């Protein structure tokens, strides 16, 4: 199912971990409109960066979220979030630095530069966090910091 010109439902629900574990990662029908909003946000990000955006993790059912170690309140489980990279643009740090000043313009509710267990990606969500300061943060193995920080 094509959600937007460049993003499909299959792309936002694909998971090698779910397949390997025999989990069905199909979202309930009531979450599809949220996934459309997430895909629309990804379209705005793609247009801004001027290069394709690769979704490394989108919707995660509760079982998959638990399997990958996601927090129980993860926006991924509600269809609000995607983890992305855009190698043709640059590193996750460069992507996050470019997008952070544009969160309101691009209607990004939250952006997180994540550098955990030797991997790096950018988490984007349509949901605005309760604390405005948490709209732009960096998370590493050492914890959480406000703003986009250089990753170790």
Image (cartoon, helix red, strand yellow):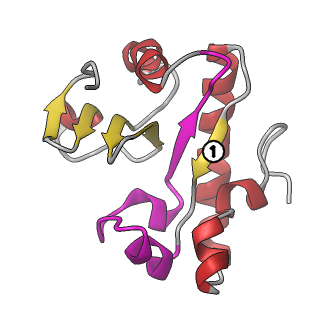
- Tell me the residue that label 1 is attached to: 55
Residue drawn 49% across the image and 75% down it? 64
Residue 131 in the image, given as x and y percentages of width and height: 16, 41
Label tally: 1
In the rendered image, residue 71 lying in the magenta stretch gets the answer yes
Quarter residue 50 falls in:
top right
In the rendered image, residue 77 lying in the magenta stretch gets the answer yes
User: Is residue 57 rendered to the left or right of residue 118?
Assistant: right
Is residue 47 depicted above or below 53 in this figure? Answer: above
Camera-nearest residue between 22 and 47: 22
Is residue 39 depicted above or below 21 in this figure? Answer: above
Is residue 57 depicted above or below 26 in this figure? Answer: above
Residue drawn 27% across the image and 45% down it? 129
The residue tagged with tag 1: helix, strand or loop? strand
Q: Among all residues in the image, which is located at the extreme front? A: 118
Residue 119 in the image, given as x and y percentages of width and height: 42, 41
Quarter residue 5 falls in:
top right
Residue 115 in the image, given as x and y percentages of width and height: 33, 37
Residue 53 in the image, given as x and y percentages of width and height: 67, 32
User: Is residue 53 rendered to the left or right of residue 7?
Assistant: left
Q: Is residue 91 visible?
A: yes
Camera-nearest residue between 142 and 98: 142
Camera-nearest residue between 64 and 135: 64
Question: In what quadrant of the picture does the C terminus appear?
Answer: top left
User: Is residue 110 rendered to the left or right of residue 121?
Assistant: left
Question: In what quadrant of the picture does the N terminus appear?
Answer: bottom right
User: Is residue 30 rendered to the left or right of residue 70?
Assistant: right
Magenta-highlighted residues: 61-89
Residue drawn 49% across the image and 30% down it? 107
Q: Is residue 28 visible?
A: no
Q: Among all residues in the image, which is located at the extreme bottom? A: 22
Is residue 136 depicted above or below 56 in this figure? Answer: above
């Amino acid at each position: 199912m094509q959600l937007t010109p460049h993003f499909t439902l299959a792309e936002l629900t694909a998971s090698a971990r779910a397949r390997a574990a025999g989990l069905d990662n199909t979202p309930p029908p009531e979450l599809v409109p949220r996934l459309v909003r997430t895909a629309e946000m990804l379209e705005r990000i793609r247009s801004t960066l001027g290069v394709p955006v690769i979704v490394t993790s989108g919707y995660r059912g509760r079982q998959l979220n638990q399997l990958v170690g996601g927090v129980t309140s993860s926006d991924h489980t509600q269809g609000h979030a995607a983890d992305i990279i855009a190698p043709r643009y640059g590193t996750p740090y460069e992507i996050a630095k470019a997008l952070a000043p544009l969160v309101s313009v691009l209607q990004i509710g939250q952006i997180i530069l994540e550098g955990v267990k030797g991997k790096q990606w950018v988490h984007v969500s349509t949901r605005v966090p309760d604390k405005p300061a948490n709209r732009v943060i960096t998370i590493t193995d050492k914890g959480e910091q406000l703003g986009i920080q250089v990753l170790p």
